Amino acid sequence: MESERCRLAPVMSSRSPGPPPSSAPASLQVRTADFRNTLALVWQASPRHAATFVLTSLLSSILPAATLWVGKLLLDAVAHAGAGGASYTRLLQLLGLQVGLTVVGGLLSTVQGAARELLGDALQHRTSRSILEKASGLPVEAFERAETYDQLQQAYREVGSRPLGVATQLVGLASALVTLASVGALLARLGWAVLPLVLLAALPGVWVSNKFGVEGYRMLRRQTHDARVQNYLGSVLTSDALVKEVRLFGFEPYLLSRWREYYLGFRRQLEDVVRRRSGWTFAAALFSALLVGLASALVLRRAAGGGLTVGDFSLFVLGLAQVQGQVGNVLNGVSGIYQNLLYMRNLFGFLELPARDLNSGEEWQGPIHSIEFQDVGFRYPLTERDVLRGVSFRVERGQALALVGENGAGKTTLVKLLTRLFEPTGGRILLNGQDAALFSPRSVQREMSSIFQDFGQYQMSAGENVAVAQTGRMDDEPGIGQAVDRAGAAFVETLPEGLQTPLGRLFQGGQQLSGGQWQRLALARLYFRGASVLVFDEPTAALDARAEFDTIEALRRETRDRITVLISHRFSTVRLADRIVVLEGGKITESGTHGELLALGGRYAQLYELQARGYAEEERQKAEG
């Protein structure tokens, strides 16, 4: 169970269990569907290797009984040879047959192992790809819920072993039944009570294994939330982005103590399970030993009466281990399949999340000349609070619209609706007078380019950081260079390999940038796309005064033949907009030009006055200093 638990803090927790099973009737239906889907997943991953694995496994399952029987015949022949009853040729024939069975078994085992390994690799690739494809199709709002990350982590846990485990255990179950039937038939010759006693002796250990396997799953399932918190605390302690602040405030001991608290909570549960499992395991072993002893006594009694040959007794001793092992394999196979399907529900549960088809709808053609919000509202799924209510405005080509409001007013949500990352739950959005819902989000988004406040810092080359905005032009170095120039990212020329320089600290040779430099690249990414709608969410937040001025001048140029939507807390930036919308509590409370809103004397004027007063105070202090 130690291998199931994280020690430090990987991104994907190794002890993020899945959701609880559903009610009994539904559970059976769900498990049956999961079983079929798992086998389909395995087969589709690599039909050739799956078929090879099944065939070699079933052929191998016949060999134990054949080997036992040939071994019995060989021992009996040796015994007869001592009394002059068997020829040397007969002994060599039996020996050759035994060696041949060993060679065939080795060949089958080799082919089986190779097929299993290649099947496992193909299956891991297919499962990982399915998870990534599903994640790519989830609506953006799904990533704003903690439950989605729980399900994503739980799905990733099952990539490595669970699907192959179900297939392997099913094939193993079939093989064990074949071996058990063939070896059991041989043991039945030794007395009517021998086989039942041997079979019963194998049951207690299997019961204990199944009982605590399910209990271990439930324990891990209860740890999902705690494991995520523990992993987060570990990531804070090892984050290059947070190390300065953690060191400065010196709260490493606090983080370590909290990390250890979660570990100790898991440890207490683990110790309880291990203690009880050990007790039950010993009791099962004792009971099994008594039953095996009784079966052995019956065989010895028959041998004492002259009813068994040496080969028969050898068959009993070796067959005893075979039968017990195969009974264990059968029952463990059943319970193992059941337990693996519990975990597979994590994977299928994630793959069954409702996805959003970004290509569904008509294809949008041409630039966007006007955008109109008509009584638009938005509410996150499974919540009761409206983030936006009754939002209406219109902006046309060549105009710039600024969104102003305090944090949480709904500005970024409005931008996500505008860019089709979200869909409104009320009202509608018109593009060139047509309902945006009629068109595929992906085709509309091709006419939009944005820089968000939490812009991406991609651990790729400088050129790739720009070109990902339009991946079909990855090799367009002149276009990338023009976008870099428009964004004022002249620092790219000073990098060791120019546009080919890898960025960030994640990979060897990467060059780390300042926040302002990363933001310049994000602006270049926006310009590279050449869209008819540009969205700026705090475009100057990480820039110094000079860079901010240059960026604002560039924004003025960009608004001439495009629609520009701007979010900023800096009124020096907001003033360039043709129209300013003030949001409070998800509603538009004021709308107009900078001058009109100042004359109105409302919330915008108050915010502007506060910021202007702050700038004036700074200038006074500088002059006095």
Image (spheres, rainbow, N blue to C red):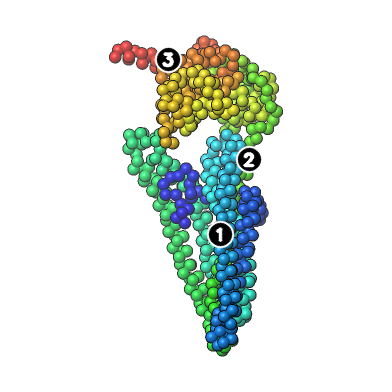
Tell me what residue is drawn at x 45 percent, y 61 percent: 274
Circles 1 and 2 in contact, beta carbons < 8 Å? no
Task: Choose top left, top right, bottom left or bottom right for residue 139.
Answer: top right
Task: Choose top left, top right, bottom left or bottom right for residue 510.
Answer: top left
Residue 483 showing in the rendered view: no
Tell me what residue is drawn at x 66 percent, y 53 percent: 36
The residues tagged by marks 3 and 1 sit, at their Cα atoms, a distance apart of 79 Å
Instruction: Tell me where residue 19 appears, x and y as whole percent.
Output: 56, 49
Mark 3 or mark 1, which has the lower sequence index?
Answer: 1
Tell me what residue is drawn at x 41 percent, y 26 percent: 496
Mark 1 or mark 2, which has the lower sequence index?
Answer: 1
Image quarter where the C terminus lies is top left
Residue flagged by tag 1: what amino acid is it?
Thr
Report whether 261 appears left or right of 353: left
For the residue pair 585 and 415, the one nearer the viewer reads as 415
Residue flagged by tag 2: what amino acid is it?
Pro
**What element does badge 3 sit on?**
helix
Q: Which residue is mark 3?
A: 612
Instruction: Tell me where residue 102 appears, x and y as whole percent.
Output: 56, 68
* Badge 3: residue crowd in 10 Å (few <14, some 14–19, many ≥20): some
Task: Choose top left, top right, bottom left or bottom right for residue 342.
Answer: bottom right
Report whether 515 appears left or right of 25: left
**What element does badge 1 sit on?**
helix
**What element does badge 2 sit on?**
loop
For the residue pair 83 and 342, the one nearer the viewer reads as 83
Q: Which residue is mark 1?
A: 110
Tell me what residue is drawn at x 66 percent, y 32 percent: 359
Mark 2 or mark 3, which has the lower sequence index?
Answer: 2
Q: Which residue is mark 2?
A: 354
